[in-house]
């Protein structure tokens, strides 16, 4: 088993999650860089990883890069990693705007360097099972889809999540997960009608988007940073032959409450964890063993739906997502 050297950029919330799961892949050797050196060191110490002194040092020390940085940094950093010929996993959203995403897709295609967006929802067992049920025709012809995702408003380093110019707000940061899953499972979106509080309130954010799908079905996507009760995800799919529903609160019977908030404890086996499976898929794609399960273009298309939702909320009119 040959070693593969992965560099994680950013030792914040997602950098920590990714490091924890890479640690379960024996051939991975990790190097971490964060502008906050103490954060990089603490994370490296926890997993026996190396610390890079700069972004450039990290690039020269690794075979592939995993970008866990605030969204507004994705475009510039990913352009640099691709130009350095480093296969790159980039946290969702692929970039802050569809224009920036298009630049990344173009650079990946031009250079032939792998770029995989971390659309982790595809690896959640319930979302992946529902996708298969639709694909196999078990639910018949799909009529309506509803998703809901959210919890309290995250802050992030320096509070970047709370600034919609930086994070994009709930449609770009949160609902982008569901937009990707809907595109993957049900096909293209014809138009979007949406309302949201993004940019209207400092303390919370909420958005509701109605999608008309090209297959004739309707989808209703709700994203919230206004629920202090802890993170919760739900969906339902109604078809001519059946109905399927999911509620993340109903899954686990073990619920943990600490000063950090309350959450359901995962009842998945460690190797079934969606983040682990996503990272393993990236490692296999870097080694050329399997194609990447999510393409950069798909990551960009999810952002195009999010941007259409923002535009609809701004104008009060239905919007056709940018075609990529
Ligand atoms: N897939 C998911 O479930 C999920 C969940 C949360 C966040 N995200 C995404 O992951 C990305 C990171 O989010 P987060 O929650 O980890 O943010 P965060 O603010 O917790 O962490 C970001 C880290 O990047 C560091 N940083 C900032 N600028 C830097 C630079 N120029 N060079 C090096 N390090 C720098 C910060 O010091 C911080 O440690 C975002 O795009 C976010 O949307 C995904």
Image (cartoon, helix red, strand yellow):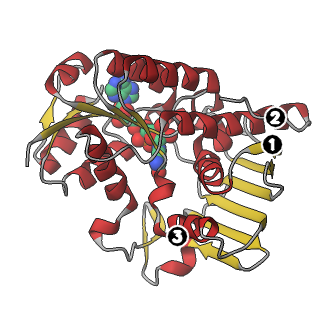
Badge 2 density bin: few <14, some 14–19, many ≥20, Cα 10 Å: many
Rendered location of residue 266, percent (x, y)? 39, 72
Instruction: Give the camera-side residue of 52 and 133.
Output: 133
- Residue furthest out toward the front: 136
Q: Tell me if 158 is positioned left or right of 22 in this view.
A: right
The reply to whether callout 2 and callout 3 are in contact (CB within 8 Å) is no
**Residue found at x 60% / y 51%:** 184
**Residue found at x 59% / y 55%:** 152
Badge 3 density bin: few <14, some 14–19, many ≥20, Cα 10 Å: few
Q: Label 3 belongs to which residue?
A: 129
Report helix, strand or loop for mark 2.
Answer: loop
Q: Is residue 244 above or below residue 324?
A: below
Ligand 1 sits in which quadrant? top left
Residue 23 seen in render? yes
Q: Is residue 51 above or below residue 294?
A: above
Q: Label 1 belongs to which residue?
A: 190
Numbered circle sitting on residue 320: 2
């Amino acid at each position: 088993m040959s070693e593969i050297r992965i560099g994680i950029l950013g030792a914040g919330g997602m950098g920590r999650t990714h490091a924890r799961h890479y640690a379960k892949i024996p051939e991975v050797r990790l190097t971490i860089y964060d502008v906050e050196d103490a954060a990089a060191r603490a994370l490296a110490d926890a997993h026996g990883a190396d610390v890079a002194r700069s972004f450039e040092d990290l690039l020269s020390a690794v075979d592939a890069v995993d970008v866990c940085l605030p969204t507004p940094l994705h475009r510039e950093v990913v352009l640099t990693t691709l130009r350095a010929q480093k296969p790159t996993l980039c946290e969702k959203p692929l970039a802050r705007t569809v224009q920036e995403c298009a630049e990344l897709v173009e650079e990946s295609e031009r250079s032939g360097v792998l770029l995989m967006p971390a659309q982790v929802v595809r690896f959640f067992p319930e979302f992946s099972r529902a996708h298969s049920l639709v694909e196999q025709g078990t639910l018949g012809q799909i009529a309506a889809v509803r998703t809901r995702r959210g919890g309290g408003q995250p802050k992030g380093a320096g509070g970047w999540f709370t600034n919609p110019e930086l994070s994009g707000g709930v449609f770009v940061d949160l609902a982008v997960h569901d937009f990707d899953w809907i595109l993957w499972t049900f096909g293209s979106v014809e138009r979007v009608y949406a309302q949201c509080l993004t940019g209207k309130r400092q303390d919370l954010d909420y958005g509701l988007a109605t999608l008309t799908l090209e297959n004739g079905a309707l989808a209703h996507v709700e994203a919230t940073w206004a629920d202090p009760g802890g993170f919760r995800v739900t969906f339902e799919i109604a078809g001519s032959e059946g109905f399927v529903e999911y509620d993340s609160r109903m899954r686990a019977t073990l619920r943990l409450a600490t000063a950090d908030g309350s959450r359901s404890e995962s009842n998945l086996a460690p190797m079934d964890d969606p983040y682990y499976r996503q990272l393993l898929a990236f490692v296999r794609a870097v080694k050329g063993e399997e194609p990447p399960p999510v393409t950069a273009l798909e990551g960009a298309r999810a952002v195009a739906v999010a941007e259409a939702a923002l535009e609809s909320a701004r104008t009060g009119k239905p919007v056709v997502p940018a075609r990529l």
